[in-house]
Image (tube, helix red, strand yellow):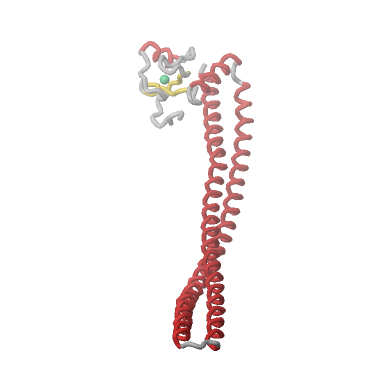
Amino acid sequence: MQNTINTLIHLQECDSKIMEIQKEMDQGPVRIEELKRNLARTEDILQEKTADLDTCKKERRQMEQDISDLEAGIEKSNIKLNNIKSNKEYRAILKEIDSLNRQKTVLEDRVLELLEEIEKKEKVLNTTVKQLEKAKTVFEHNRKTILNEIEDLQHKKNDLEKKKAEISRKIEPDLLKRYNTLRKNRGGIAVSAVLNGICKTCNIAIPPQKFNELIKGTDLISCPNCKRILYYTEDTEVKDAT
Ligand SMILES: [Zn+2]
């Protein structure tokens, strides 16, 4: 009976390791997705900055167009000025030219501001482009690292699966079925240690008679609470099967 119990414990250890590895493997794609989201954020920032710069450039073009429209207006007024007869009309046109010139100055100042802004924004944009390039390289490197890790884990898992198959062959089919059903229904843990009369997995005290049977080791004993297959240990270091 002790042999059977030991085999079950080995199987349990093997299954727990497989489960752990599987969990770790499942984290791989999640981590890659997270990295992708981070990269996408940098891409979004770049897009925003590009759009912002384009808006400034567009405004500048519009201002320049407005300035040349004003210049055309000024030129037209100057031509009119040459063909004026009355003083009153002359003064009105001078006033008009003066107003157009003042509008032109305002626009020219704004263009200068925009040129400065554009220069600043282009610098920031260049930095962001470089940051994105770097982020892409880092992403690719990290992605490959994670994929390599998954591959390593897959190898480890394959080895454990082989070991599991070997161990399983040593177990009676009915008992193996019971073990697997328990594992499935009990969070992956089918075999539990009993330390100081307590099931280590569900923390319930084993009734004295059952405990004595367990120590005798002639039969497989189930935990009255969690139904897991029990084994006796005096090792306080025995790790929780979870
Ligand atoms: Zn229990």
In the displayed structure image, the side of residue 152 where residue 187 appears, left or right: left
In the displayed structure image, the side of residue 197 where residue 173 appears, left or right: right
Depth check: give the residue in front, 30 or 192: 30
Residue furthest toward the top? 209
Q: Position of residue 102 (x, y in %)?
A: 45, 79
Depth check: give the residue in front, 229 or 218: 229
In the displayed structure image, the side of residue 184 where residue 151 appears, left or right: right
Depth check: give the residue in front, 212 or 183: 183
Among the 4 quarters of the image, the one containing residue 98: bottom left
User: As displayed, is residue 99 above or below residue 176?
Assistant: below
User: As displayed, is residue 21 above or below residue 36?
Assistant: above
Quarter the C terminus occupies: top left
Question: Residue at the spot x=60%, y=35% of the render?
Answer: 157
Depth check: give the residue in front, 230 or 35: 35
Q: Position of residue 91 (x, y in %)?
A: 44, 85
Question: Residue at the spot x=50%, y=22% of the render?
Answer: 190
Q: Position of residue 131 (x, y in %)?
A: 54, 62
Q: How many marks?
A: 0
Instruction: Tell me the quadrant of ligand 1.
Output: top left
Question: Residue at the spot x=52%, y=35% of the render?
Answer: 20
Q: Position of residue 224 (x, y in %)?
A: 41, 14
